Image: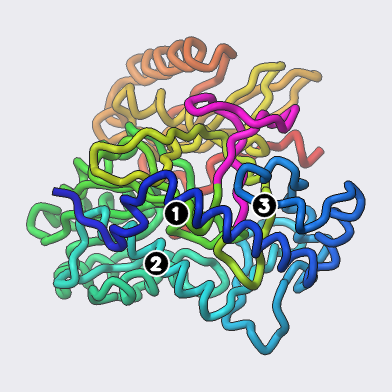
């Protein structure tokens, strides 16, 4: 029997959801036109008045918003409320230029916490549980997003944040957390440190992991579940929309339910921007119909995914999105072939290699060269040079088959690649530096 945090919305009929979405879209568009000069200008340019939007079916009449619009209006230009009504400010974890700044009213934070609470309950977390949060706290939305979700649904929070992996393991042992929340790469770092310390994950009461903030494959899920002896659930969010809790997996682990009463999803062709039908992959677009401070309209996430409106066997009627295949702006083009880092990870894990890797891209003699560095396990490292080279050739052949482009594979010493407490940096594209 499935557990719901807010069954009245999580299992609502499509008719009920459409009514909620339509009412909130009409309010959101009016709010943007009246209080955000950026949107008023965009609407006026295409001759659109708030009164032209009468239901959620009219959403395609609205213009798109992109990340550059947030940067161009840095820091508070897209906020739709006065400073007196602001309750919280976060910012993206961007690596170049100005961060994208997001604001929340008290109601926004409560609704964000609702989404995170729905995710926790869907993963089987109860009010009697202790939840260990190893996402970063601060301007990054991960830590506080799950923190408020845990408090909202009534469980106990351990705000461990990131870093000091040995201490994290000690807290897991001493406090007896039933659930852990962090990036999937950090979950494997914790598992690796436990193995090195001779700690058996079966001796911990952990049973659930909620992982997000970076792409991860089904093969990586199986690796985490095996090493930590838990069930691993995906959670989706992005700072511009709300952070973790925009969408979440249920017990079926076959896609993430979107909190579509707050965030209305569309899938569009990334080139033509035309809407795509259920089941077809394209760019995920969100309209924030439940936000007051930063109600973004048709925001292009750059994530490549698909959605389905079929009722899930868990009983939830909320639309489901598939785990993103990658990002249109993270996609590598190698000698004319589109390559997503998730494809590389799938090959590595399918062949039984450790999931610690890095992709290096260079341009040599005007040709793209991609090298995948993969850490060896101790058993492979102790093998003969000939066998190591044979393994490299085997992986390279598999990469060629899956990616459709030749790749160099370099097996490196155990624990020689960087470890990350937050989002893992998997790609170093030196072509952009020259």
User: Is residue 196 positioned above or below 377 on the image?
Assistant: below
Where residue 398 sits in the image (x, y, percent)?
A: 43, 14
Magenta run includes residue 280: yes
Tag 2 or tag 3, which sits nearer the N-term? 3
Badge 3: residue crowd in 10 Å (few <14, some 14–19, many ≥20): some
The reply to whether callout 1 and callout 2 are in contact (CB within 8 Å) is yes
Tag 2 or tag 1, which sits nearer the N-term? 2
User: Residue under circle 3?
Assistant: 54
Locate residue 159: give its quadrant. bottom left
User: Does residue 354 appear in the picture of this structure?
Assistant: no
User: Residue under circle 1?
Assistant: 259
Q: Residue furthest right?
A: 45
Where residue 52 sits in the image (x, y, percent)?
A: 76, 51
Locate residue 296: give its quadrant. bottom right
Q: Please, what secondary structure does the residue beneath circle 2 have?
A: helix
User: Is residue 93 positioned above or below 77 on the image?
Assistant: above
Where residue 13 sits in the image (x, y, percent)?
A: 37, 47
User: Residue under circle 2?
Assistant: 114
Q: Residue at x 44, y 54 (%)?
A: 259
- Horizontal side, residue 122 vs residue 129: left or right: right
Q: Residue furthest bottom?
A: 84
Badge 1: residue crowd in 10 Å (few <14, some 14–19, many ≥20): many
Q: Residue at x 75, y 22 (%)?
A: 364
Which stretch appears magenta? 265-288
Where residue 63 sits in the image (x, y, percent)?
A: 77, 47
User: Does residue 106 appear in the picture of this structure?
Assistant: yes
What's the CA distance linking mark 1 and mark 3?
A: 21 Å
Q: Please, what secondary structure does the residue beneath circle 3 have?
A: loop
Badge 2: residue crowd in 10 Å (few <14, some 14–19, many ≥20): many
Q: How many marks?
A: 3
């Amino acid at each position: 029997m499935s557990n719901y945090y807010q069954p009245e919305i999580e299992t609502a009929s499509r008719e009920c959801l459409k009514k909620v979405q339509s009412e909130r879209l009409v309010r959101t568009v009016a709010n943007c036109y009246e209080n955000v000069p950026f949107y008023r200008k965009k609407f006026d340019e295409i001759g659109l008045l708030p009164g032209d939007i009468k239901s959620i079916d009219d959403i395609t009449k609205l213009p798109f918003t992109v990340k550059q619009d947030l940067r161009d209006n840095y820091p508070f230009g897209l906020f739709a409320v006065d400073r007196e009504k602001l309750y919280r400010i976060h910012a993206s974890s961007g690596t170049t230029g100005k961060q994208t700044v997001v604001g929340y009213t008290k109601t926004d934070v409560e609704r964000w916490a609702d989404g995170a609470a729905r995710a926790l309950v869907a993963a089987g977390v109860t009010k009697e549980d202790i939840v260990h949060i190893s996402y970063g706290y601060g301007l990054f939305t991960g830590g506080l997003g799950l923190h408020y979700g845990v408090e909202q649904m009534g469980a106990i929070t351990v705000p461990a944040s990131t870093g000091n992996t040995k201490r994290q393991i000690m807290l897991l042992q001493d406090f007896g957390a039933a659930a852990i929340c962090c990036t999937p790469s950090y979950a494997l770092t914790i598992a690796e440190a436990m193995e090195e310390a001779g700690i058996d994950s079966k001796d911990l009461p952990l049973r659930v992991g909620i992982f997000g903030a970076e792409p991860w494959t089904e093969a990586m899920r199986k690796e985490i579940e095996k090493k930590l002896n838990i069930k691993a659930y995906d959670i989706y969010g992005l700072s511009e929309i709300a952070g973790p809790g925009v969408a979440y997996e249920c017990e079926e682990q076959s896609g993430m339910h979107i909190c579509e009463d707050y965030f209305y999803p569309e899938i569009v062709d990334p080139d033509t921007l035309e809407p795509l039908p259920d089941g077809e992959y394209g760019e995920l677009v969100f309209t924030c119909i439940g936000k007051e401070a930063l109600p973004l309209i048709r925001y292009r996430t750059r994530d490549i995914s698909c959605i389905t409106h079929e009722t899930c066997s868990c009983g939830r009627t909320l639309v489901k999105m598939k785990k993103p295949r990658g990002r249109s702006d993270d996609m590598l083009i190698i000698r004319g072939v589109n390559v997503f880092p998730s494809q590389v990870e799938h090959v590595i894990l399918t062949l039984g290699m450790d999931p610690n890797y890095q992709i290096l891209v260079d341009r040599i003699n005007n040709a793209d060269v991609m090298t995948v560095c993969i850490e060896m396990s101790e058993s492979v490292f102790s093998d003969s040079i000939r066998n190591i080279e044979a393994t490299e050739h085997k992986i390279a052949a598999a990469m060629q088959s899956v990616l459709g482009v030749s790749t160099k594979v370099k097996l490196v010493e155990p624990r020689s690649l960087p470890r990350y407490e937050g989002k893992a940096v998997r790609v170093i594209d030196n072509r952009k530096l020259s």
